Amino acid sequence: MVFVGLVAGPMLSTLPAGDYYASAKTWSYVGLNMVLFTVHKLPGVFTILPYSHSVNSSLWTLPIEVTMYASTLVLVPAVLWRPRLVMPAMVVAVFAALFVVVRHPWALRPISEMQLYSFRLYGGLSYMSCYLIGMLFAFTGADRMTQHAKAMAVKLCVVALLCSQFISSRYNLLISTVPFCVLTLLVGLSSRFSLKLLSRLGDVSYGTYLWGFFVQQLIVWSLNGAITPIVLAAVSLPVSWLLGALSWHLVEQPALRLKPRSASALPPQQVPIDRRATMRPSEPPMPPPSRLAQQ
């Protein structure tokens, strides 16, 4: 946000640099996005593009993500305290959220229309339910299933997704969300689908997502829109991936090093060893051969 708003923005804007920095929209883009109130426009930037009303639309998910990260601080201790009560409640919450999205019942509209940061609660319910499914996946230890159980789970998810296509589109989200999330987690955690070559750059997936839209807008702007969607995807993906790698190594990984290490990660303490306790008790000496012969 700071780089796009204060470094790239004036170079891409149709306004002079002085007018660009003097505009309140410039500082609202940087300041409000940093406190999770999403602002999409910068003065004079990408105004002639087909998708001109957003510089980087990837930022819209940040309020939802931070909200769910905050909920983790409550849900994890609650599950550890009362797992048989809290985990079924999370399952009910998943389907209740999806039901509200599908049906949007009149009685719940005042709640679903509430503003949470810069988005309506109704607009984030389906994504929040996916996050809860991922938490349940971790809490139940589904990632530690046997290979046979994982294969069966993948088949069941695929069948459920295929069957959901024959259901009314209004209820498709309610039926397909759970198997889609579980299938995504199973495939993503499978060693058979690991991208070892790409993973050598680090955990770059989130940085790639955050930079992807801006990179695509920049490419379209530089070519005056003379590019096909397929070529745009082929060109923007490696650029976004490299920016995601820089973000990982310069921002995310250094920030993760600031976390307190868990007990399992701490080096083992050096406990002094009492060698006398490890020695076997001395055995009585053997009598000399002459005494043995007399006996």
Image (tube, grey):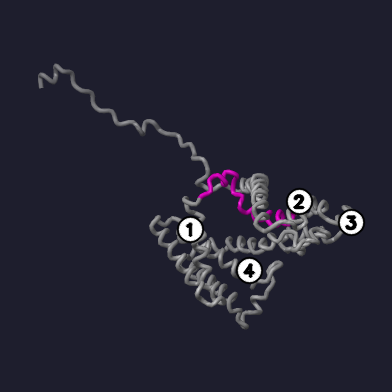
Q: Earlier in the sequence, mark 3 or mark 4?
A: 3
Is residue 38 something that shows in the picture? yes
150 vs 49, nearest the viewer: 49
The kind of secondary structure the magenta stretch mainly shows is helix
Residue at the image point whose x is 63% and y is 69% from the top:
124
Q: Is residue 172 magenta?
A: no
Cα separation, mark 2 vs mark 3, equals: 18 Å
Residue indicated by mark 1: 186
User: Around disc 3, counting alpha carbons within 10 Å, would you say few (fewer than 14), some (14 to 19), or many (20 or more)?
Assistant: some
Residue at the image point whose x is 47% and y is 51% from the top:
192
Q: Earlier in the sequence, mark 1 or mark 2?
A: 2
Residue indicated by mark 2: 3
Q: Which three-letter amino acid code belongs to the residue tagged 4?
A: Gly
Q: Position of residue 218 (x, y in %)?
A: 74, 54
Q: Which mark is residue 19?
A: 3
215 vs 145, nearest the viewer: 215
Residue at the image point whose x is 80% and y is 58% from the top:
45
Cα separation, mark 1 vs mark 4, equals: 24 Å
Looking at the rendered image, the quarter that the N terminus falls into is bottom right
Q: Which numbered disc, 3 or 4, marks the residue closer to the eye?
A: 3
Q: Secondary structure at mark 4?
A: helix
Q: Position of residue 184 (x, y in %)?
A: 52, 60
Residue extending farthest to the bottom is: 106
Cα separation, mark 1 vs mark 3, equals: 51 Å
Q: Which three-letter amino acid code belongs to the residue tagged 2?
A: Phe
Q: Earlier in the sequence, mark 1 or mark 3?
A: 3
Residue indicated by mark 4: 124
Q: Which residues are magenta?
A: 194-218
User: Around disc 1, counting alpha carbons within 10 Å, would you say few (fewer than 14), some (14 to 19), or many (20 or more)?
Assistant: many
Q: Earlier in the sequence, mark 1 or mark 4?
A: 4
